[in-house]
Image (tube, rainbow, N blue to C red):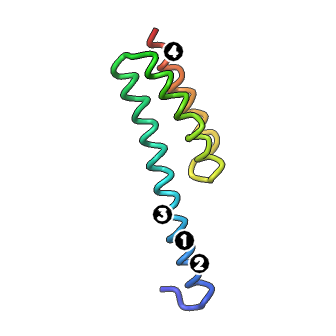
Amino acid sequence: MANSPQSKKRARQNEKRFAVNKARRSRIRTYLRKVEEAIASGDKDAAVAALRSAQPEIMRGVTKGVYHKNTASRKISRLNARVKALS
């Protein structure tokens, strides 16, 4: 349990940050799921459109500290390869 005023403040800040990061991670996962569903359905146009909308959201997660840059690049690269393979 936090005792000092500073540790109490840090605990409050951590709760807020956790909520923001959780929402951001959830939004990114939603975009990823849309790409996955488009790939699974075999619709290349929908998959390309979904990937285009997902890329900036994933990279925004990097700048906000939710994901590591290499993790995001790897996810985008693998999705891109799967979309290209649809043709």
- Location of residue 56 with respect to 38 vertically, above or below: below
Dot 4: what SS? Answer: helix
Q: Dot 2 corresponds to which residue? A: 10
Question: How far, Cα to Cα, is label 3 from label 4?
Answer: 35 Å
Question: How far, Cα to Cα, is label 2 from label 3?
Answer: 14 Å
**Left or right of 53 on screen, residue 29:** left
Q: Residue sitting at 50 percent across and 24 percent down?
A: 49
Dot 2: what SS? Answer: helix
Dot 3: what SS? Answer: helix
- Location of residue 55 with respect to 41 vertically, above or below: below
Instruction: Give the x, y percent position of residue 41.
Output: 33, 20
Residue kind at label 1, given as amino acid type? Asn
Residue kind at label 3, given as amino acid type? Ala
Question: How far, Cα to Cα, is label 2 from label 1?
Answer: 6 Å
- Label whose residue precedes the other's in the sequence (4 or 2): 2
> Which residue is at the front of the view, 10 or 34?
34
Instruction: Give the x, y percent position of residue 84.
Output: 51, 15
Q: Dot 1 corresponds to which residue? A: 14
- Location of residue 61 with respect to 52 vertically, above or below: below
**Left or right of 57 on screen, residue 41:** left
> Which residue is at the front of the view, 7 or 43?
43
